[in-house]
Amino acid sequence: MIVIKRKPLEEILGYIEGHDKILVLGCQECPYGCATAGGDAVKRLAEEIKNKMRDLGKSIEILEKTLIRLCELRYVKGINDLIKEVKAVVTLSCGVGVNLIADIYSEIEVYPGMNTLFLGAELREGIYIEKCRACGDCIVGYTAGLCPITRCPKNMLNGPCGGSKNGVCEVRKGLPCVWYQIIKRLKKRGKLEKLMEIWEAKDWRSLYGEGVRELREGLRVGNKN
């Protein structure tokens, strides 16, 4: 899941300074638990903004809307009428949502209400841990399902660095050395030979590419092109 965190209220207020009517736009399905980006979060942020403005002796009108997903054009078009009423939008979504809204409605000021943190797993309610860096070239088939790109601060590809000790990372205290875990797991499975090949330095073009990356998943039904 995409793990996101709400920006500080003061930062958001700085974005919308000078506007007397804005839209707070939420994303219902994608971000973790939807607690930080769905309908309740939209109402909560709108109230916080109104209260703060009132304290400052100012007034602001806030429209509220939550879409199923802000990363799909078919849903985003649902705010066409609302957009005509405002000059600024605050999105409660990952960075994909805010970018898409800004692209479609280029005449409107679009601001992020969230920070996108990482792709992670929910271990238990409220506890999330990063599991994937979305690098575009997954190697965990060779490393027993453990990603050294995500879990190693140095992105080591050919075993642990010289600083790890007793299975613990030297960079971050208490962080398990992922290469210690990989070797231990492969040894238990009798597959240490998977690590005999020396990997060249990672080709980061699969992550950073040459600007914007794009994927086309084949042709739509009825599309002859």
Image (spheres, rainbow, N blue to C red):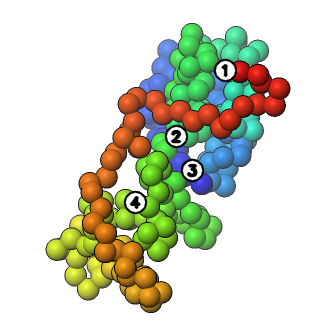
> As shown in the figure, which amino acid type bears the numbered disc 1?
Glu
Mark 2 = which residue?
114
Q: Mark 1: which secondary structure?
A: strand
The Cα–Cα distance between marks 3 and 1, rounded to whole angstroms, is 30 Å
The Cα–Cα distance between marks 3 and 4, rounded to whole angstroms, is 15 Å
User: Which comes sooner in the sequence, label 3 or label 4?
Assistant: 3
Residue 50 drawn at (x, y percent):
61, 30
Numbered label attached to residue 150: 4
In front of the other: 38 or 132 = 132
Residue, x 54% and y 66% (percent of image)?
Answer: 127
Task: Characterize the local packing of mark 4: few (<14), some (14-19) or many (20 or more) Cα atoms within 10 angstroms.
Answer: some
Mark 3 = which residue?
2
Q: Are marks 3 and 4 in contact (CB under 8 Å)?
A: no
User: Which comes sooner in the sequence, label 3 or label 1?
Assistant: 3
Mark 1 = which residue?
61
- Mark 3 or mark 1, which is nearer to you? 3
- Mark 4 or mark 2, which is nearer to you? 4
In front of the other: 80 or 47 = 80
In front of the other: 31 or 153 = 153
Residue, x 72% and y 31% (percent of image)?
Answer: 219
Residue 130 appears in the rendering: no
User: Which comes sooner in the sequence, label 3 or label 2?
Assistant: 3
